[in-house]
Image (cartoon, rainbow, N blue to C red):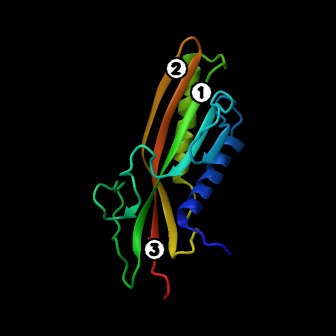
């Protein structure tokens, strides 16, 4: 069996969960995502008008890195945990970004209808990141996931009249993991 690392395992789980919540369970065409994928969205947004792209880190902010839970500048999100465990092991935050685009171009929607639909997609994205189950994930290098937390978001409008509306944004989230020493 090939080695696995915790970050791609978490990304796979998040994408699978969000695909169900943002595509499979949605019937309103104005709120149904076209794609939920890992990496940067690089397709035509007029053809896949509602897209979610999830990746580790933050491409525009290199300081947005993974690290042990006690690193300065880390978002505490109301959870205090010790960095080290008795007998070995460390608790880490693995950090991720979910970018969202809602391109209502050629859809003939009014600004008000497009705004409500886009914010509903954004709200579902943020809410369902928190309910992704990762506690059964472990990698080949002694790291296991516990819980994922969305802790920051932004969402803004672009485009405009007549009836060509675009919303873009992102949700930042962290997954608490534990790393135990590998046997020597």
Q: Earlier in the sequence, mark 2 or mark 3?
A: 2
Q: Name the residue carrying label 2.
A: 159
Q: Look at the picture and state if 146 lies above or below 74.
A: below
Q: Of residues 44 and 137, which is closer to you in this image?
A: 44
Q: Earlier in the sequence, mark 3 or mark 1?
A: 1
Q: Quadrant of the N terminus?
A: bottom right
Measure how far apart labels 2 and 3 are at the Cα level: 45 Å
The answer to whether mark 2 and mark 1 are in CB contact below 8 A is yes
Does 14 sit left or right of 91 as displayed? Answer: right
For label 2, the SS is strand
Measure how far apart labels 2 and 1 are at the Cα level: 9 Å
Which mark, by number, is residue 77? none
Q: Look at the picture and state if 54 lies above or below 88.
A: above
Does 17 sit left or right of 88 as displayed? Answer: right
Q: Name the residue carrying label 3.
A: 179
Q: Earlier in the sequence, mark 2 or mark 1?
A: 1
Q: Residues within 10 Å of mark 1 (few under 14, many from 20)?
A: many
Q: Residues within 10 Å of mark 3 (few under 14, many from 20)?
A: many
Q: Is residue 163 visible?
A: yes
Q: Residues within 10 Å of mark 2 (few under 14, many from 20)?
A: few
Q: Look at the picture and state if 63 lies above or below 109.
A: below
For label 1, the SS is strand
Does 168 sit left or right of 48 as displayed? Answer: left
Measure how far apart labels 3 and 1 are at the Cα level: 40 Å
Q: Residue furthest bottom?
A: 184
Question: What's the residue at 62%, 34% (across, down)?
Answer: 50
Q: Name the residue carrying label 1.
A: 103
Q: Position of residue 6 (x, y in %)?
A: 54, 66
Q: Position of residue 135 (x, y in %)?
A: 55, 67
Q: Is residue 25 visible?
A: no
């Amino acid at each position: 069996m090939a080695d696995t690392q915790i970050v791609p395992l978490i990304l796979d789980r998040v994408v699978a969960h969000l695909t169900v919540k943002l595509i499979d369970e949605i019937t309103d065409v104005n709120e149904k995502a076209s794609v939920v994928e890992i990496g940067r969205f690089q397709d035509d947004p007029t053809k896949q008008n509602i897209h979610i792209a999830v990746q580790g880190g933050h491409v525009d902010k290199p300081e947005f890195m993974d690290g042990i839970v006690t690193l300065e500048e880390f978002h505490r999100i109301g959870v205090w945990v010790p960095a080290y465990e008795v007998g070995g092991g460390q608790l880490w935050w693995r950090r991720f970004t979910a970018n969202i685009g809602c391109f209502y171009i050629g859809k003939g929607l009014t600004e008000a209808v497009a705004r409500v639909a886009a914010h509903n997609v954004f709200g579902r994205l943020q809410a369902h990141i928190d309910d992704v189950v990762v506690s059964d994930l472990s990698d080949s290098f002694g790291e296991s996931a516990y819980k994922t937390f969305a802790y920051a978001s932004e969402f803004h409008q672009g485009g405009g009249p007549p009836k060509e509306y675009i919303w873009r944004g992102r949700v930042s989230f962290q997954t608490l993991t534990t790393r135990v020493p590998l046997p020597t």
